[in-house]
Image (cartoon, rainbow, N blue to C red):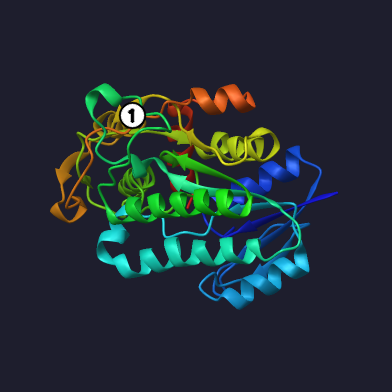
Amino acid sequence: MKKALIIGAAGFVGSYLIDHIQKNCIWSIVVTKLPHEKIEKENIEICDLNILNPGEIDELLERVRPDYIFHLAAQSSVALSWKNPGMTVDINIKGSLNVLDAIKKLDYKPRVLMIGSGEEYGHIRPEETPVNEDNVLRPGNIYAATKACQNMLSAIYHKAYQMDIMSVRAFNHIGPNQAPMFVVADFCKQVADIENGRQDPEIRVGNLKAKRDFTDVRDVVKAYVLLMEKGISGETYNVGSGHAVEIREILDMILNCSEKEIQVTVDPAKLRPVDVPIIEADIRKICRDTGWEREIGLEQTIRETLDYWRHQ
């Protein structure tokens, strides 16, 4: 039986990835988390791991000897990267380098998927939309710069040490149980709080003109597993819907699901120092190489995310 290791599985994506593997693959699963985090899943091995401690990674990999490694551990909030750039650099660059170095020391070559971001492309010119994997990277924020660096390091380790590594540039993925530091979860939580009388009928927003590419997290983790099975070593793959939507349109969808009259107010605290106008994925490469297709529509994801917050 193949063994999958998910590094950083306590976050939003990790839970869905565990569920997808258990439902669709005959793999045993080992997952890591930080000591203060909780993972409530059955039939998996759960380990504490700090990726800023190289010795811990070495020890875990030698003991577990996984066939597949999903590297999910990251500081993944753009907003938080502006507030705490040092921590973002430590986790996303130093932590990823520690993981790559530990894998390099093994006496066999596991298959590795490094999770990056569509934010890496940064300021995309109109003629470059939708953006493909060969496009020039112009990161527009600190989180994006760290993920671009992770991608470059992964490519170097693949070429220099013949490691079986693929990278993903995942565009905005959304769904129930996502933290409200991300835009769709934030809007849904605020609307649910208004409906339940915990917040005045006013929703506070940032830049509504930005266009982003949103995909249901369940489709995203399906893409990750297909890449493990069928992806080409050394390649980088976009994972997204292939269609950018204005944040204003997302907000309108959420507001239309509520019977409450809600006022919209721009909150300066939610505005970023730099915001890229449009990020839209060209997804032809992953569809060609793996047969992946998006199955869950945006309206369904928004409806289910709002219902999740209504029940919290």
Q: Is residue 151 above or below residue 126?
A: below
Q: Nearer the viewer, residue 279 or 10?
A: 279
Position in image of residue 183 (x %, y %):
33, 45
- In the image, is 290 to the left or to the right of 3? left
- What residue occupies the far front of the structure in this picture? 160
Q: How many marks?
A: 1
Position of residue 28 relative to residue 250, above or below, is below
Q: Which residue is mark 1?
A: 253
**In the image, what residue occupies the spot 41% across and 68% down?**
90
Q: Residue at x 32, y 44 (%)?
A: 187
Q: Residue furthest right?
A: 1
Is residue 223 found left or right of 26 in the rendered image? left
Q: Nearer the viewer, residue 301 or 219?
A: 219
Question: What's the residue at 37%, 69% (across, down)?
Answer: 87
Horizontal side, residue 217 vs residue 187: left or right:
right
Instruction: Give the crowd class for mark 1: few <14, some 14-19, many >=20 residues within 10 Å.
Output: some
As helix, strand or loop, the secondary structure at mark 1 comes to: helix
In percent of width and height, residue 106 lies at 71, 64
Q: Is residue 24 left or right of residue 240?
A: right
| Mark 1 residue type | Met
Image coords of residue 284 (percent x, y): 50, 22
Q: Percent from the top left, x then y, of residue 20?
A: 67, 41
Identify which residue, 94 or 36, lies in the foreground: 94
Residue 295 seen from this side: no
Q: Is residue 226 visible?
A: yes
